[in-house]
Image (cartoon, rainbow, N blue to C red):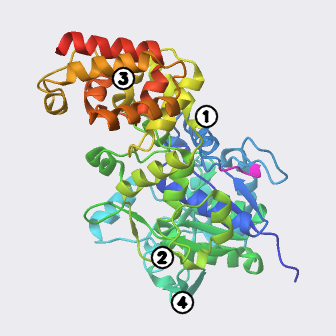
Amino acid sequence: MAQRKVRVRFAPSPTGALHIGGVRTALYNYLFARQHDGEFIFRIEDTDSTRFVPGAEEYILESFRWLGIPFDEGVSFGGDHGPYRQSERRDIYKHYVKQLLDAGRAYLALDTPEELDAKRQEVQNFQYDASTRGGMRNSLALPAEEVKRLLDEGHQYVVRFKIEPGEDVHVDDMIRGDVVINSSILDDKVLYKSADELPTYHLANIVDDHLMEITHVIRGAEWLPSSPLHVLLYRAFGWADSMPKFAHLPLLLKPDGKGKLSKRDGDRLGFPVFPLEWHDPKTGEVSSGYRESGYLPEAVLNFLALLGWNPGTDQEIMSLDEMVRLFDITKCSKAGAKFDYVKGLWFNREYILKKDNAELAPDFDKILRAHGIEAPMERVEAVVGMMKMKKINFIKDLWPLCDFFFIAPETYSKEDKFVRKNWNENAAADMTELAALLERLDDFSLESQKAAVDRWAEETGQKPWNPWRVALVGTGKGPDMYELSAFLGKDETLRRMRKAVEILK
């Protein structure tokens, strides 16, 4: 049999914001597809109409546009296997539900919600399965005429998969190896509900994966308990030969303590768990996003890629193309990965350092404008270049570090330790002399200033740099003094120096 083209999918539900764990799942699918010259499909699983949230689908698509993860086909991308939105595939699912019923692999269950609740009260850990279904209201236990009468009366029903007990079901997992689960612990899952004429996740997922020719299912470890059921469904349909390979990724765990990463952890520790800011249309709650918090998309992807996988080397910084080349799904961890959000900050800092100043400047320009400052973009770029080395985590961190480039100090506080230490009784005279020297320079470039001032300092024994910083900045921060004065220009440099002398004496 010819080897099939690799096809993987990411299939979120439009029930709210996209969790960062979902982003990692999508990333691993993308890396796997690209590595094998395969295709990456975007599908929307919206069979649970009660949980639909307006705007969620577009939010998910916008998240991937920002992150730079492209899809080859699917919702909003087109393709030959559509429709890709499950709510538009009702008739397809009905056909396969009938196939299972006709083959005796599924049955109608007509139990009311009240009857099911009563049974759960009566039987501890009740499970609808081979040991209990004979005593329930379903087409296996009731006479055919009784079932027909109930259906004719419009009685609501669900279709349950008939699982035979006592069989060891093998799941071939690319990360975890051969996973064996006995069918006796599985319940007869609901596959279809007459109330909304829609399938549940379990049936729709299997039918779609088969018809869309999905070759590999890469998903979170939370879906591992469902995999034996999916294996049994593939067999029930006669599709065992085209069953995809499974890979269940490690869970993302809390940064501290035990358990799965949640939005509450982000709220508690101050980091986002969503790629973009999310405005909940139901509650009005606003949740922070990586984009709005100031993260670079490349940094987010790099950070996520190494949560549960590593290339087997010490390399940490890698481009998306490098990830594609190095990624090995079989080397993913089985154990959960702690969400080290502090490491995420480190990645963002490293990517800021790597990025060209011209690419960073527009974001800093927005911050300047928010403070009422308009400057030519080349000057914005120059400031970014001088100051991004100051161990900033985000571009927004630049403003308090370099406001003095654009706003001259108005006061010089003697409470400031740097001012108090470096503006001594000789400082005013030294700055007056230095200002006179600088005024005589026709060339005010960094190199010209450095040559003249260094020579003067050596000849006179003066050490003007810290008092000079007080005069130009007002405190002990900023870049190299020659870089700063060259940026400010001759007139502004002299104006600030003379003002400091006048105020500080």
Asked which secondary structure carries label 3, the reply is helix
Q: Identity of the amino acid at label 4?
A: Asp
| Observer-nearest of 324 and 144 | 324
- Please report contact status of discs 1 and 4: CB closer than 8 Å, yes or no: no
Q: Which residue in the protein does label 4 denote?
A: 168
Counting from the top left corner in percent of width and height, residue 306 is at: 50, 65
Quick check: is 70 in the magenta stretch? yes
Reading the chain from its start, which is encountered first: label 2 or label 4?
4
Write down the quadrant of residue 505 in the picture.
Answer: top left
Front position among marks 2 and 1: 1
Tell me the magenta residue range.
69-73
Asked which secondary structure carries label 4, the reply is strand
Mainly helix, strand or loop, the magenta region? loop
Q: Identity of the amino acid at label 3?
A: Phe
Q: Which mark is residue 275?
A: none
Q: Which residue in the protein does label 1 denote?
A: 358
